Amino acid sequence: MIHLSPTDIVIILLYFGGVLFVGYRSARRTGSSEEDFLLAGRSLTLPIFVMTLVSTWYGGILGVGEFSYRYGISNWVVQGVPYYIFAAIFAFILAKKIRATNLFSIPDKLAAAYDRKTAVLGSILTFILMTPAPYILMLSVFLQMLFGWSLVISLTVTAIVAVSYLFAGGFRADVETDVFEFFLMFIGFAVILPYCSSRFGGWEYLQSHLPPLHLTWHGGNSMQYILVWFFIALWTLVDPAFHQRCYAAKSGKVAQRGILISIFFWLLFDFMTATAGLYARASLPELREPMMAYPMLAEEVLPPVAKGLFYVGMLATIMSTLNTLAFVSAQTLGRDILLRMGIGGGKVLSDEAQPLQDPASRGIQQPSNLSTRYTQLGLILAFLVSIVIAVAIPSVVRIWYTIGTVIIPGLLVPLMASYFEPLKIPARFAFSAMAGGWLTSLAWMIAGLASASGAYPLGIEPMYPGLIVSIGLWAAGKVGDSS
C-alpha cells in the first residue's frame, strides 16, 4: 500500500498543474494550419529534439520494473541494447531521408510511394502500433495506487490531463510538456538510487540477495524468446514518433545527430531503472505484483519529499509517452484514415499528401486546418479505443509483445523499401506484403492461443512467419517488376 505525506501530495499536484500550465501555454502559440498543429512548424532544434525523443521512449516504466523484477539484468539486454542498435541504424540510414520528404506521417509516405489503398492499410496498422493503451493503463493504475481513486475517476483525470491540452495545442504542446518531463524523469530515479545504496549496500548486497539467473544476460529465458524481442525492437524503424520528430526537425542533420545523442541518455536512464529493479527484487523477494516493483521499493526506502519527487518522475515518464502516442494515434485515425477516405463529409487527402482536395476537383487547394479538426476528433476516438484495449489486455508487457509481434511484420518491409528507389515494388505487391505479413502473424498467434497446449505452431514465435511472408511477397514484387 502506498502512503503519501501531505508534502508528497502537494508535489504531485504541482506536477499536474505544471503539465497543464506548459501545455496550455503552448496552445496559445499554436496556429490552426496543418504544419503548425501537426509538426510545430518544423522548428525543433537539437536540444528540444533530444529531450522530446528521449522522454517519449520510456513510458512503460511499470513494465520495465516488472521485467527487471522477473528477469534481472536481462531487462537491459532485451529492452535496451536492441533499441540502441536500431536507433543508430535509423539515424544513419533514415533520419535525413525522412526529413527531406517534407511530409507529415508514415501513411503520407506510403501514399506517395505506392497508392491510397496501401496508405489506408498502413494507417490502420500504424494506429494499432501507436495505441496509448498500455500507458493509459499504467497511468490509471498508478493514480489508483497513489490516491485510492476508482478506475473511472483515474481514467477521467488521465483524459483531462493528457488529452485536453493536446486538443488545443497539438504537437507543440506535446513537445514542450516532453521537455518539462525529461528533467523530472531523470530527477526521480536519481533520487531513489542513493537511498537504496545507503539502506542496503552496493553490488555485494545485490549479488548475495538476487537469484543467480538475475545476474545473467538471459535471465533464464530461451534464446528464441530473447531473439523475438530483438525483432520487436525493429519497431524503432517503423515507429511513427521517430518519423514525426524527424519531420518536425529544423533539418536532417538535427534529426540524425539528435537520435545519436538520445542513445546516450537512454543508456543512462536504463542503467538507473535496471539498478532500481535489481534493488526491488533483492529487498522485496515476495512481491505478488511485479508491476509494483518501483512503487513498493519507494515505499520501502524513501522519506517524504523524496518519495513525492520519485513518484513525479514516474508520472512524467509515463505521461510523456502517453501524450505522444495519443497525438500520433489521433493524427493517424483522424487525418490519415477518416480524412484520407473522405469519411464524415470531409475532403479527401491526396495520395501525394499535398493540401486537401475535393474528390471531384483534384488540384483545388482547401484549408489545411481541416486536418487539425480531424486530428482533434481522432484524439477523442483514439482515447476511447485505447481504454477498450487496456481493459481487454490488462498487462503492459503483454500489450507490447502482442502489438509488436503482429504489426511490425506488416509495416516493416513496405515502409523501408519506400525510402530506397532500388527496393521499391509495385503498389499491388506492397499492399500484399503489408497485408500478408500482419495477417500471417495474427493467424499464427491466434492458433497458438487456441491450441490445447498454448504453444505456437511448430514452436515458432508469430513474428517470424509474418516477416517471411512479407519478405517473400516483396521479392515476388521485385521479380515481377523487373520482368
Image (tube, grey):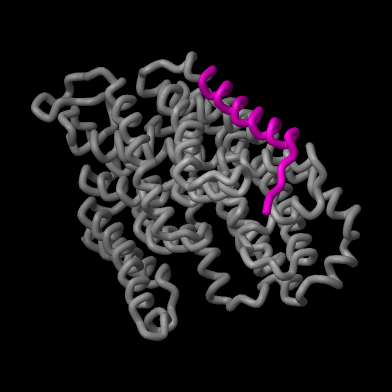
Q: Is residue 329 visible?
A: yes
**Rendering coords of residue 261 (x, y %):** 67, 40
Residue 247 belongs to magenta span:
no
Q: Position of residue 14 (x, y in %)?
A: 66, 28
Please indicate whether residue 443 sits to the left or right of residue 167 in the image.
Answer: left
Which corner quadrant of the image does residue 406 belong to? Answer: bottom left
Residue for point 57% across, 51% down: 60
Residue occupying the point 62% across, 57% down: 64
Q: Position of residue 224 (x, y in %)?
A: 53, 76
Toward the viewer: 331 or 12? Answer: 12
In the rendered image, residue 9 lying in the magenta stretch gets the answer yes
Seen as rendered, the residue at the extreme left is 360
Residue closest to the eye, 34 or 237: 34
Please tell me in which quadrant of the rendered image residue 316 appears. top right
Q: Nearer the viewer, residue 239 or 257?
A: 239
Left or right: 224, with 317 as reference point: left
Residue at 41 percent of width and 55 percent of height: 391
Q: Quadrant of residue 177?
A: top right
In this rendering, the count of numbered labels is 0
Of the 4 image quadrants, the one containing the C terminus is: bottom left
Q: Which residues are magenta?
A: 1-25
Q: Is residue 92 visible?
A: no
In this rendered view, identify the residue nearer to me: 463 or 157. Answer: 157
Examine the rendered structure and indicate whether residue 315 appears above or below residue 368.
below
| Residue 229 point in image, percent of width and height | 54, 65
Q: Quadrant of the N terminus?
A: bottom right
- Main secondary structure type of the part rendered in magenta: helix
